[in-house]
Structure formats: structure tokens, C-alpha cells
Image: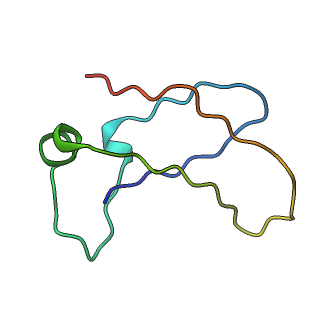
Amino acid sequence: HAWANFRLSPGFNTYKLKHDTFTQPVWAQRLDLKQDVLKKLTSVVIGVFCEKCKMEAGTVVVDNIAFEK
């Protein structure tokens, strides 16, 4: 498990996350993201949440996910 949180902006945007942006839960066995996780990656889960927000309608479209060195 590794995750990264970031704020979405209205409109169509490109978001780039550096490897060191991702964190692991405190209970998880420590893994090296580049060596242990990305080389064996089989799926990506994308979730949307908010803190202290009002209910709104909207859509999040994911067009492309790329992992670059």
C-alpha cells in the first residue's frame, strides 16, 4: 500500500506526483516505492474524498496514468 493526497482544481488539469509524495500506512511493512512497489505494480485505485465539505455533484475523469523515471 502507498498513497498520495492532492487537491483537485476545476477544469481539465494534469497532475504530476513525485515518487517521494507517496506514503505508506504506519502499520505496513516498510517497502521501497521504486524497487518493491512500482516494479511489481498490478493495479491502481483512485478515490475521491473531502474533509469538512458540502455535498456537490461532479465528475473526475482519468485519461492517462504514466510512470516516468
Front one among 64 and 7: 64
Count of numbered labels shown in the rendering = 0
Q: Is residue 49 above or below residue 16?
A: below
Q: The C terminus is located in which quarter?
A: top left
Colour approach in the figure: rainbow
Q: Is residue 39 left or right of residue 14?
A: left
Q: What residue do we see at 31% from left, 43% from top?
A: 20
Q: Give the residue displayed 57% in from the left and 54% down from the top.
A: 47
Q: Quadrant of the N terminus?
A: bottom left
Tell whether 11 sits left or right of 65: right
Q: Is residue 28 above or below residue 20?
A: below
Q: State which quadrant residue 65 falls in.
A: top left
Residue 61 in percent (x, y) is at 66, 35
Residue 3 locus on image (x, y percent): 40, 54
Residue 34 lies left or right of residue 12; in this view the side is: left
Residue 67: x and y, percent? 33, 27
Which residue is drawn at the image coordinates 86% and 65% (left, top)?
A: 54
Give the residue drawn at x 44%, y 35%. Answer: 17
Q: Quadrant of residue 24?
A: bottom left
In the image, farthest residue toward the bottom: 27
Residue sitting at the far left: 35
